[in-house]
Amino acid sequence: MPHGAMLTELAIVTGYLLITLVIGVAAFRVTDRGAVSYYLADRSLGTLVLVFTTFATLLSAFTFFGGPNLTFAAGPEWILVMGVMDGVLFAILWYIMGYRQWQFGQQEGYVTIGELLGDQLGSVGLRRLIAGVSIVWLFPYVMLQQMGAGEAIVGLTGGGVPYWMGAFGITIFMIGYVAVAGMRGVAWTDTLQGIVMLGVVWIAVGVVVQAAGGIGALGTAMAVETPRFLALGGGVYTPQWMIGTAVTIAFGVTMFPQINQRFFVARNVRTLKRSFVIWPVMVVLLFVPAFMFGAWGAALGVTVPPGENVIAVVLSAVAPGWFVAVVIAGALAAMMSSSDSMLLSGASYFTRDLMATSRADAFGRLGEAWVGRIGVMIFALAAFGGSLLRPGTLITVGDTAFGGFAQLTLPVLIALYWRRTSARAVIVAVVLTQLWYLGHVFIGPISVGPMSVFAATYLGWDFALYGMLIGAMITVIGSVIDPVVGHLDRR
């Protein structure tokens, strides 16, 4: 790539990042210095901002870079998993869990789900456990954003800027931005970023379709070059895999700190109800075109070098460099809108659920909000270090994090609605299902002795689903027998 062209494209991306920084500074000027204002924007978000900040926060490197690369390799059925199934499933969970959390937050002033459960069930240990598990699974997902940023910059500059430099640059920017902006600035920029993402993706679709000679020509190319893409299922897309992946992602998203914490910030209940209705439409509007890029790239015979993204490669073949830079800026916006919220929420879990429960003066003279800012810096730099190891594809890293969070969802959902839920039962459920999940991630499925009949796939269903069911059963059964055991102990 010519040096001048590379500088132009980097200037476009940098300019966009600076615009978001200006918005963050503006938000800082009107934000109270207290923790609730920093973490939850004083619980004042309206429908438009709440929808877009959740939308932009959910969309990440997993969406923009992992998804198109998967459809490039395996076909467009990924649209059904993410664009339709998860759009509907998460919307339902948003309303069921989000409404209940919002009620508790309005009544008791809770900032995190761990704080809510720990207080309602009378267990500091449960509060710390939920926060600790959440932070553990948040780490690979922040790392995923940095991996995606590094790959995006490599693709944009044709390798002129190395992977580590792109990932590090985005990391430093995020640290500065989150430290300044807080939730209000994050929500404002998320609204901008959500609009930008939708706009640039649909414009990019128009560019590719026109360059290919129309939708009909793209369909013909798929029929000739990748006929298997026109048939539903096949390859990795078994019914068990699609349903299992959709369920674990939807339930995992619900417990993501950066998503879950948004259940506390709605201005009123009408905001929640409107957001619930709008959500599936927003998801389909973005996921369908973004993922079709991968399938179109395969049909057009595009070659994607290892470590690069199909969107950048396809657009580079049919559009000028400045337009590719605009689209990549939009994709980076998606990653930043996820990362900034992750860092902010992770800091709140650390300060409120881990530090504040250890001793009354845990924050000293700095105060909770400034300790949270320091936590943001440490967490982001540690995740950057992990991203240099590149432990797997974006889909692999992201899906692993989704499954870990999904193990929390059913015990938490039961606790939110069932007054007889035992804190000890939830603790046992969380610990055992996390051990189950981690064992399968790092060791593998059980395939010896009487369990060998299930082979490595457990009848084709994801082991994360089994963990979710185990957690629900332990929570219910444990909550029923816990008072009985306690009564016998007292006797």
Image (spheres, grey):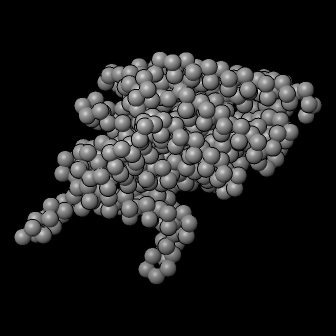
Find residue 387 and report its horizontal and vertical position in percent: 67, 50
Find residue 360 and report its horizontal and vertical position in percent: 32, 45
Instruction: Return the residue nearer the eye: 306 or 232.
Output: 306
Is residue 278 shown left or right of residue 469? Answer: right
- The residue lying at 29 percent from left, 48 percent from top is 118
Is residue 32 shown left or right of residue 96? Answer: right
- Outermost residue on the bottom side: it is 449
Q: From this viewpoint, is residue 359 visible?
A: yes
On screen, 335 above or below 456? above
Instruction: Examine the image and state in which quarter residue 82 appears.
Output: top right
- Outermost residue on the right side: it is 2
On screen, 344 above or below 475? above
Find residue 427 and report its horizontal and vertical position in percent: 32, 58
Q: From this viewpoint, is residue 300 visible?
A: no
Is residue 204 shown left or right of residue 267? Answer: right
Instruction: Return the residue nearer the eye: 235 or 128.
Output: 128
Q: Quadrant of the N terminus?
A: top right
- The residue lying at 76 percent from left, 23 percent from top is 12
- The residue lying at 68 percent from left, 45 percent from top is 147
On screen, 44 above or below 75? above
- The residue lying at 43 percent from left, 60 percent from top is 434
Query: How many numbered circles does the render carry?
Result: 0
- Outermost residue on the front side: it is 365
Q: Quadrant of the C terminus?
A: bottom left
Find residue 456 and report its horizontal and vertical position in percent: 54, 69
On screen, 324 above or below 397? above
Instruction: Return the residue nearer the eye: 149 or 69.
Output: 149
